[in-house]
Amino acid sequence: MSALELIATTKTYGDIIAVDAIDHKFASGTYSCLLGPSGCGKSSTLRMIAGHETVTSGDIILGGTNVTDLPPAARGTAMMFQNYALFPHLSVIDNVAFSQKMQGIEKTKRRARAMELLELVDMQEYAERIPDQLSGGQQQRVALARALITEPSILLLDEPLSALDPFLRIKMRTELKKLQRSLGISFIHVTHSQDEALALADEIIVMNNAVIEQSGSPSEVFNRPNSEFVAKFIGGHNVIQTDTGKIAVRTDRVKIQKSKSKGAISAAIQDVEFLGSTVNVTLNSDPKGEMVVSVSDNVFYENPMEIGETAFLSWNKKDAHKLAE
Ligand code: ADP
Ligand code: MG
């Protein structure tokens, strides 16, 4: 049985169709990422799952129960918000214990439970501080502990890493994944970052214009994008028009050479970008348009190329992936 099933789930706001009859089954105990550009309907989907937004039509089935019309607290989900939404005047431990206080659980008992969750996210030493006295990463851990105290079967996270600086983002990303593995519950994480989704997810669900474009494991989505949109959004691909339709070829699978070989296409180098372990070369090839080739830094600098030079591009047929029209 899947942990969560969306059946023709739809959300409209007046004339705007934010989520257009999406169907999806989320497996239990997995880390799923809803990935897509701003405005594609990710947060609306998550909020409907949480019960913070009404469902215009369709159904939401959680662990076999139709929860479409149930209030948030009756669903067994918990949500961690983008800005963490901690109570500024409450100590860390009281923030975490808050939902248990609402349930009327006695003070020593709820504080003991809150402490266990603070230990889980390694924040036990900060229990008596208020949120203002914590860094962004620490606030996030408190928000996680606060969401987890309800023992949800599914944790919903809306852009949980976007407020963090790049270094901390990668550190917290690893911690989220570790936490999901150790708890064994399903996490559904909304992000517009391809890197984040590729690094974290067991399953990526790519959304665009209120619908699901593609879902699959990170390697399936990255290596076999089924549309031009997914190939471009997931990044690392060239989309090339051929006589028989469009193909996608990974930027690191295109070979770039100074001299012409059979079948290679010529292109003018427009830009060379050093990215550390790789160098991205952007070229313009008439009539195929812009192409990007990603070369490992040692290969590139053995035989460097410069802006304005003409280069020749080729790829193996097996690396060319046909896209749906
Ligand atoms: P995402 O999280 O992918 O950025 P959202 O689910 O927030 O997308 O929004 C999807 C669409 O619905 C957008 O066009 C957005 O402007 C619109 N929308 C979201 N919330 C509301 C609202 N409360 N009222 C009206 N339109 C909304
Ligand atoms: Mg959003």
Image (cartoon, rainbow, N blue to C red):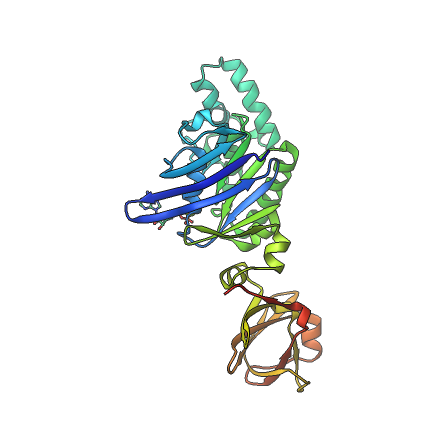
Q: Is residue 131 left or right of residue 247?
A: left
Q: Residue at x 58, y 45 (%)?
A: 173
Q: Residue at x 66, y 87 (%)?
A: 260
Q: Is residue 241 above or below residue 179?
A: below
Q: Is residue 208 left or right of residue 117?
A: left
Where is residue 230 shown, x and y percent of the image?
52, 59
Q: Is residue 251 left or right of residue 21?
A: right
Q: Is residue 287 above or below residue 318?
A: below
Q: Is residue 181 above or below residue 236?
A: above
The answer, for residue 55, to whether it is visible in the render is yes
The answer, for residue 146, to whether it is visible in the render is no
Q: Residue furthest left?
A: 14
The answer to which image quadrant residue 71 occupies is top left
Tell how many labels: 0
Q: Residue at x 54, y 40 (%)?
A: 25
Who is closer to the viewer here, 188 or 241?
241
Where is residue 240 shown, x and y percent of the image?
54, 73
Where is residue 156 shown, x and y percent of the image?
50, 37
Who is closer to the viewer here, 216 or 57?
57
Who is closer to the viewer here, 56 or 154?
56
Q: Is residue 297 above or below residue 8?
A: below
Where is residue 56 shown, x and y percent of the image?
35, 39
The answer to which image quadrant residue 195 occupies is bottom right
Q: Residue furthest front?
A: 244
**Quick one: quadrant of the N terminus?**
top right
